[in-house]
Image (tube, helix red, strand yellow):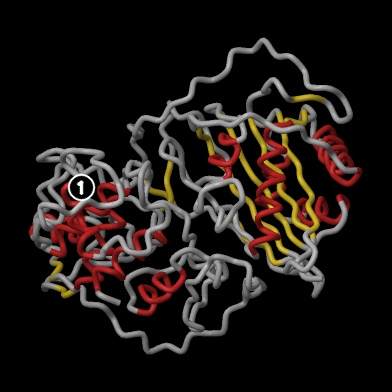
Amino acid sequence: MATLLAIASLLLGVAFASPAQAVGYSAEEVAFVELINDYRASHGLDPLLVSDVISEACDRHSSDMGKYGFFDHYTVASDWFASGSSPWDRMAACGYDFNTYMGENIAAGYGTADAVFAGWKNSSGHNANMLNSSYEVVGVSLVYVSGSDYGYYWTTDFGGYVDSTAHSVGAEPVTTTTEAPTTTTEAPTTTTTAASPTTTTVAPTTTEAPTTTTTVYVPPTTTTTIIHVPPTTTTTTTAYEPVTTTTTARPTTTTTAARPTNTTARPATTTTSTTAPATTTTTVVPPAASVFADVTGSTPYAHEIVLLADLGVVTGYGNGYFGPMANVTRQQFAKMIVLALGYNVSPLTACAFKDVAPLPDSSDPLYPAGYIAACAAVGITVGKTPDTFCPYDQITRAQLITMVARAAGLAGPPAGYTPVFENFNEAHYPWARRAAYAGLLDGLAGLGAGYDFWAPATRGEVCLLLANLLGD
């Protein structure tokens, strides 16, 4: 039977919850907790308590993956959660809504605790989650779904705070008097610096070895690194364009950043993910030309990702992965939209923002100052302030939509038009309303009442809006 593994990590607190249901543990689930705690003890780490509320979130996600035919950290369809829910959303919805360290490992096709433990132990990213000293509790779930793609589905979620439902294996929940971390839902204010992607993969060693995919979610207060630090600490974020050690001399002539034509034959995909069964609600199917191992038929915005990649607007991380759920910095988006629209970019054009400077070690001498200046010249961006752009800040959905709407030059919709979302901000709502009326938001998952416009935009969401902007 085919097997799959995946991992995610973050630090985040979300403010919504539902009462936990009674959670029981199978022999294999108990065996897994014993294995991981013995493993941690061998490395001088404290054992993990089992959190019932986290296990409930795990149970529901494992069941959803099997029932609706997807394998992902982000919910595609569910009996309990909204489409697009992250591990942290699911944990919070089940009652674990603390601002603390969190992580997730998932697997499919492994029927025993020994097998899944060995698979995760042999994958550097999954192994790091199991040996993370910041975690205090774990939720665990093994669900068998008859007739599903892989049969067995595992989810383990980790947390850094001992909640009131946590207990030792086989024991009742313990009472904790430790003060809970505060939960925050405010927009991020942390300044970040660019770094190379940290996404890792592990190649199969035999035909029976799992295909491992590492997925990293970037919350508003943290980064794409596997190990996260508290939100009050300045951290790093993933750069879209990989940085090389070769310095390229600046050209002396104006360069047109037109959409390049892909003349290189694209190799066949190496992903082992299978086509979702008929019960899935996912309808977007990417072209067969996709070469990204983490972009399959069940990946949100797969068609748009492949389209933008074929146009040369976006690239992967250099290891075969695209990172559709990774977030995008403001300077990265500036380059994406300039390439998509073919604007003229000159290294001699001064950038008016005092916090934007060329990157001397970048393989692209126009990045980021040239692209940001081009965006400012046509009114796509007006900066965070008149003289600052905040290039390393993650672009929010509201900012993304506003910039795309400006690029489209949209006029206001009819006076009586009401979008599916409410007025969320005086500056951004009018642009979002125009974008919705023009169809630029068509296909955006979760759009409606309560949509979080202040969440960081993902690479997949950027591809969707840019593809809609291009009319493709």
Label total for image = 1
Task: Locate residue 363 relative to residue 339 in the image: left or right.
Answer: right
Q: Position of residue 455 (x, y in %)?
A: 38, 43
Instruction: Judge by depth and name the residue closer to the eye, 410 or 48.
Output: 410
Which image quarter holds the N terminus? bottom right
Q: Is 313 situated above or below 334? A: below
Q: Give the residue drawn at x 41%, y 30%.
A: 185
Q: Is residue 280 left or right of residue 56?
A: left
The amino acid beneath tag 1 is: Val
Viewer-side residue, 365 vs 283: 283
Per the image, the residue denoted by label 1 is: 356
Q: Residues within 10 Å of mark 1 (few under 14, many from 20)?
A: many
Q: Is residue 422 left or right of residue 155?
A: left
* Residue depicted at 30% across the width and 60% down the height: 441
Q: Quadrant of the C terminus?
A: bottom left
- x and y percentages locating residue 63 in the rendered image: 70, 53
The residue depicted at 60 percent of the width and 46 percent of the height is 80
Where residue 130 appears, as percent x and y from the top left, is 73, 41
As helix, strand or loop, the secondary structure at mark 1 comes to loop
Classify residue 187 by image quadrant: top left
Q: Is residue 427 above or below residue 120?
A: above
Quarter location, residue 111 = bottom right
Q: Residue furthest front?
A: 416
- Residue 263, percent across and down? 37, 89
Report the front residue among 174 and 48. Answer: 174
Extreme-right residue of the structure = 27
In depth, the one of 359 and 465 nearer the eye is 465
